[in-house]
């Protein structure tokens, strides 16, 4: 198979041309002229992505060539939009146009550099994705701790806009959940590879569907409870949906059992509905969720709109999108500052006013491309662990995009997720670039010659070896 | 594991499909809704990008703009404050607009199709020329006299309204209402302060935001006799036809008396005398004799029961006018309630009238029976003051013939010359009219009305007026209304203040 690294380079160049064009349009619309330095952010980004491209060339030559350019395009447009906010803010304060490294745009540029370095380090250190399975339990523990920290911390240190998803220390804040999903996927994958026999074979047939034995339900119930705790104490449906969805899907992929999906979905939506009813009647920790559901059901109701923490954000998001219409006002020509949190959660809505339905649809397609490329790596990779990790990560990414974009467009109740690669903020960008590095690594194993990434079996003639075993991953035997 | 992975891939595809479908809903189907939604601040800011047109009357700016330094570039200013507020209304940042500011909003904001050429020109020149300007038909002198005289009336009345119309065209010369309000705080760019000012006005039990000239209906009292007279004259009566009168008239439980014992105590009185003295028994009997259908039909012909009238632009919208009503005048079984008919014929019972309806009645008589549709917008001017529209007077209805109008005019002139309306006299003009004192709630002071008109020495009907004062204490409630009416008409026809 060809490495297709040159294809990657070509696509990357194309993506950067688009980013440069976006920057030029912003300046034309916002400042009234295209400054001689309009190309600098795009050029800097190009250098950064080129660096990652070089690392990939040497460490993962068979990696999927579409992933980096697609992510780079979204990342670049994100930086461009944030810089556009900086320019807009400065001009409305009658200040000169800010420098390239100033403001949130400049900071995002720095975060991009940091994220790409992290991604490169991951690619350099982890030459075979199966190595990760050695640390599965550690990662699992780390994941759960990361999920729980904001729930345990007092609100003053963990709450932003009603969602307790943060660790805030001084002026610095991170969203540990972003990293948790990477750790949790790795742990789930390892756990499920070991348990898949038990979970998929031991079953009772009921109504034509194979249901697992009661004792095997333990881990599912545990994760279900965990995500409902997240829902209630971190006040965030989206994160709960994200963790639970990720677990159920890896479980389903591992066991090939539709019954897990049915159980999972029933449990989740049953739990959510219960939380809604409890919020309506009991209040307490469920009240926030009930309020959010009300806001979602009727955002334009005055009682919801004028309430503190009500539908103001969602309404402004919808109005921004609606104002954009089919074609949008053009980059730089909208009024994104009417949308609260437009640099983070609502960045898609802010961009939607300027690039319109057509622009956003194109962005959606690029996201879908990344997710489906991740899925393809999962399909083609030879080992079960790799399949589950790649499949789980790709699905999580897709689900996160669904949760946040569905939230800001009123499709599902709004939650405090970041938009991957687009939102301002280091945690999200770093975690998602690490996710991409993992997908690159696994796709390298999938597309490369049979043993290129593994190092254990050498290709060539000889008796067929047993399939690659995971470190310590003995398949559990069914107990009668 | 590949089969479930493929399915997971399909699930993501479906989720993205849902996102895409929903985006179409938000950005295509609902786009126009959202673009113009009240919560959308872009709409507000865009409205303040260019100066709003000026509203003026007689060369005086009534609604103007002041350049600000903030995001909303122009502040609306109403230099005359309370006097014109019921007509102009106001155009706040986020609350609803009212008055001419509301009904002419498209033109004032520049969004009107009539200003399309100006907008196209803007696109080439890059200028943001303002919206179109509105010239009102108001006579500033009459308007300010009306407001000032209502406010400083000699009886300490707190609520009332006045309307003056040019009978020949329907052009409104004055439209005032007390208590009024200062619209300036309502249009403040400090939206909280604006909302607070609005809520304060809203809670005021005297309802200063109510345009009493167009929106408030009250029992018209004896001004109703003009309609009964018109019905009688149209039915073949002459001004000197003797009609039955007397000091008291009992009909189906209703007892009609005259205001004072010396009014028409005899058994017969001419129609003209009956109106001049405001003979209650005579008109009550006349109404019963004519019958409900004729009285109600004549009221309707004059504009009662019309809830579609707006006063503003003859080819567009304007200030809404509440319908005046005669009431059912019926027994529970639907037959004519003669007692109610007797009372209704002198403007009591369930008869309710707006001040503008009163002015229209007087104007109709003065204009030979033709009622012109009232209007406020005399001209629409482009931003560079080209005339885009000029009001083209329209006959709204013709309730009475020219001869009936002429007889009725003589009768009404007699009211001012010899009868109850002498306070409305203006030197050098022939003034006619009819007073009205309407009993309302038990123990409350009556409302005082005057409807009238003035002819100049060339015999042209130059002004018609209606003044309504609520709960006038000290007797002769209508006399004060007549006095103010005279002053307003004098101002409208170019005479001095007082």
Image: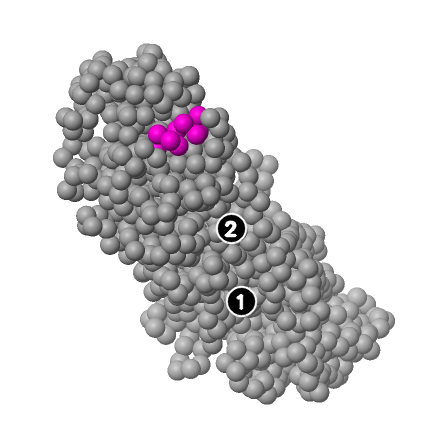
Q: Please indicate, yes or no, whether residue A231 appears anywhere in the rendered image.
A: no
Count of numbered marks: 2
**In the displayed structure, does residue B43 sit left or right of residue B488?**
right
Q: Please indicate, yes or no, whether residue B314 appears anywhere in the rendered image.
A: yes
Between marks 1 and 2 in the image, the one whose residue lies nearer the viewer:
2
**Residue B302 x %, y %:** 43, 30
Q: Identify the image quadrant of the N terminus of chain B.
A: bottom right
- Identified at 58% across, 51% down, the residue is B390
Decide whether residue A465 is among the magenta residues: no
Q: Which residue is mark 2?
A: B377
The subunit letter for the residue under badge 2 reads: B
Decide whether residue B411 is among the magenta residues: yes
Q: CA distance from mark 1 to mark 2?
A: 20 Å
Q: Which residue is mark 1?
A: B51
Q: Nearer the viewer, residue B76 or A136?
A: B76
Question: Principal SS element in the magenta part?
Answer: helix
Q: Which stretch appears magenta?
A: B404-412
Q: Are marks 1 and 2 on the same chain?
A: yes
**Residue B235 x %, y %:** 42, 17
Q: Nearer the viewer, residue B136 or A287?
A: B136
Q: Nearer the viewer, residue B352 or A295?
A: B352
Q: Nearer the viewer, residue B113 or B49?
A: B113
- Identified at 58% across, 85% down, the residue is A97
Q: Is residue A437 above or below residue A398?
A: below
Neighbour class for label 2 at 10 Å: few (<14), some, many (≥20)? many
């Amino acid at each position: 198979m060809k490495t297709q690294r040159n294809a990657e380079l070509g696509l990357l160049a194309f993506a950067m041309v688009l980013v440069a064009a976006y920057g030029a349009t912003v300046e034309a619309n916002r400042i009234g002229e295209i400054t001689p330095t309009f190309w600098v952010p795009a050029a800097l980004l190009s250098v950064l992505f080129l660096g990652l491209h070089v690392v990939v060339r040497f460490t993962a030559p068979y990696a999927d060539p579409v992933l980096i350019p697609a992510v780079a395009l979204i990342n670049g447009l994100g930086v461009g939009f944030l810089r556009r906010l900086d320019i807009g803010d400065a001009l409305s304060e009658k200040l000169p146009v800010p420098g390239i490294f100033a403001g949130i745009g400049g900071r995002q540029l720095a975060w991009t550099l940091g994220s790409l370095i992290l991604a490169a380090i991951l690619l350099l250190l982890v030459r075979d994705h199966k190595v990760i399975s050695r640390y599965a339990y550690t990662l699992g523990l780390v994941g759960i701790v990361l999920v729980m920290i904001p729930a345990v911390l007092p609100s003053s240190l963990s709450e932003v806009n009603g969602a307790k998803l943060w660790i805030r220390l001084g002026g610095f804040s991170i969203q540990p959940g972003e990293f948790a999903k990477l750790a949790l996927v790795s742990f789930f994958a390892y756990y499920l590879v070991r348990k898949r026999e038990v979970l998929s074979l031991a079953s009772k047939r009921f109504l034509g569907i194979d249901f697992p034995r009661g004792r095997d339900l333990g881990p599912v119930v545990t994760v279900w409870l965990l995500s409902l705790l997240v829902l209630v104490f971190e006040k965030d449906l989206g994160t709960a949906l994200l963790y639970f969805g990720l677990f159920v899907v890896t479980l389903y992929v591992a066991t090939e059992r539709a019954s897990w999906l049915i159980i999972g979905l029933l449990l989740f939506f049953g739990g959510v509905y219960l939380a809604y009813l409890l919020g309506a009647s009991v209040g307490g920790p469920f009240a926030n969720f009930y309020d959010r559901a009300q806001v979602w059901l009727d955002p334009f109701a005055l009682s919801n709109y004028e309430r503190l923490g009500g539908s103001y954000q969602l309404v402004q998001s919808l109005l921004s999108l609606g104002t954009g219409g089919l074609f949008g006002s053009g980059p730089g020509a909208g009024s994104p500052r009417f949308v609260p949190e437009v640099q983070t959660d609502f960045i898609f809505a802010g961009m939607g006013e300027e690039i319109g339905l057509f622009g956003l649809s194109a962005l959606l397609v690029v996201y879908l491309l990344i997710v489906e490329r991740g899925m393809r790596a999962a399909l083609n990779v030879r080992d079960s662990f790799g399949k589950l990790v790649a499949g789980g990560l790709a699905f999580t990414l897709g689900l996160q995009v669904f949760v946040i974009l569905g939230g800001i467009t009123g499709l599902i109740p709004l939650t405090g997720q970041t938009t991957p690669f687009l939102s301002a903020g280091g945690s999200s960008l770093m975690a998602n670039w690490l996710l991409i590095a993992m997908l690159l690594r696994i796709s390298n194993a999938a597309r490369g010659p049979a043993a290129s990434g593994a190092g254990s079996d050498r290709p060539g003639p000889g008796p067929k070896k047993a399939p690659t075993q995971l470190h310590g991953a003995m398949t559990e035997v069914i107990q009668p | 594991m590949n089969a479930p992975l493929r399915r997971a891939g399909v699930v993501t595809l479906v989720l993205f499909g849902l996102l895409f479908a929903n985006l179409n809903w938000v950005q295509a189907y609902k786009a126009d809704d959202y673009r113009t939604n009240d919560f959308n601040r872009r709409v507000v800011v865009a409205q303040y990008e260019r100066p709003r047109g000026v509203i003026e009357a007689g060369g005086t700016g009534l609604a103007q703009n002041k350049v600000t330094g903030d995001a909303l570039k122009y502040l609306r200013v109403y230099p005359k404050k309370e006097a014109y507020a019921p007509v102009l209304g106001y155009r706040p940042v986020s609350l609803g607009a009212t008055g001419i500011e509301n009904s002419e909003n498209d033109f004032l904001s520049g969004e009107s199709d009539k200003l399309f050429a100006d907008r196209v020109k803007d696109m080439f020149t890059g200028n943001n020329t303002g919206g179109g300007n509105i010239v009102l038909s108001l006579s500033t002198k009459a308007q300010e006299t009306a407001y000032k005289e209502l406010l400083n009336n000699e009886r300490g009345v707190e609520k009332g309204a006045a309307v003056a119309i040019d009978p020949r065209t329907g052009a409104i010369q004055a439209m005032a209402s007390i208590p009024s309000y200062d619209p300036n705080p309502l249009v403040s760019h400090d939206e909280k302060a604006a909302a607070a000012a609005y809520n304060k006005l809203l809670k005021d039990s005297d309802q200063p935001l109510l345009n009493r000239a167009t929106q408030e209906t009250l029992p018209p009292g004896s001004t109703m006799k003009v309609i009964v007279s018109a019905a009688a004259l149209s039915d073949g009566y002459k001004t000197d036809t003797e009609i039955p009168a007397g000091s008291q008239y009992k009909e189906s439980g209703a007892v009609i008396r005259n205001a004072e014992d010396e009014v028409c105590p005899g058994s017969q009185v001419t129609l003209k005398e009956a109106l001049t003295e405001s003979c209650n028994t005579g008109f009550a009997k006349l109404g019963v004799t004519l019958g409900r259908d004729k009285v109600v039909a004549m009221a309707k012909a004059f504009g009662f029961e019309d809830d579609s009238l707006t006063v503003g632009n003859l080819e567009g919208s304007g200030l809404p006018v509440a319908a005046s009503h005669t009431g059912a005048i019926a027994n529970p079984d639907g037959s004519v309630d003669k007692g109610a008919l007797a009372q209704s014929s002198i403007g009591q019972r369930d008869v309710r009238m707006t001040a503008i309806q009163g002015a229209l009645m007087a104007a109709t008589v003065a204009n030979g029976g033709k009622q012109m549709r009232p209007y406020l917008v005399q001209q629409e001017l482009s931003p560079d003051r080209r005339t885009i529209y000029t009001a083209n007077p329209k006959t709204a209805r013709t309730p009475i013939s020219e001869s009936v109008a002429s007889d009725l005019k003589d009768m009404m002139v007699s009211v001012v010359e010899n009868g109850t309306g002498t306070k409305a006299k203006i030197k050098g003009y022939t003034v006619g009219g009819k007073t009205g004192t309407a009993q309302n709630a038990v123990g409350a002071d009556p409302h005082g009305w005057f409807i009238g008109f003035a002819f100049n020495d060339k015999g042209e009907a130059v002004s018609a007026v209606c003044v309504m004062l609520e709960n006038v204490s000290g007797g002769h409630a209508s006399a004060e209304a007549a006095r103010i009416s005279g002053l307003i008409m004098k101002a409208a026809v170019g005479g001095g203040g007082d």
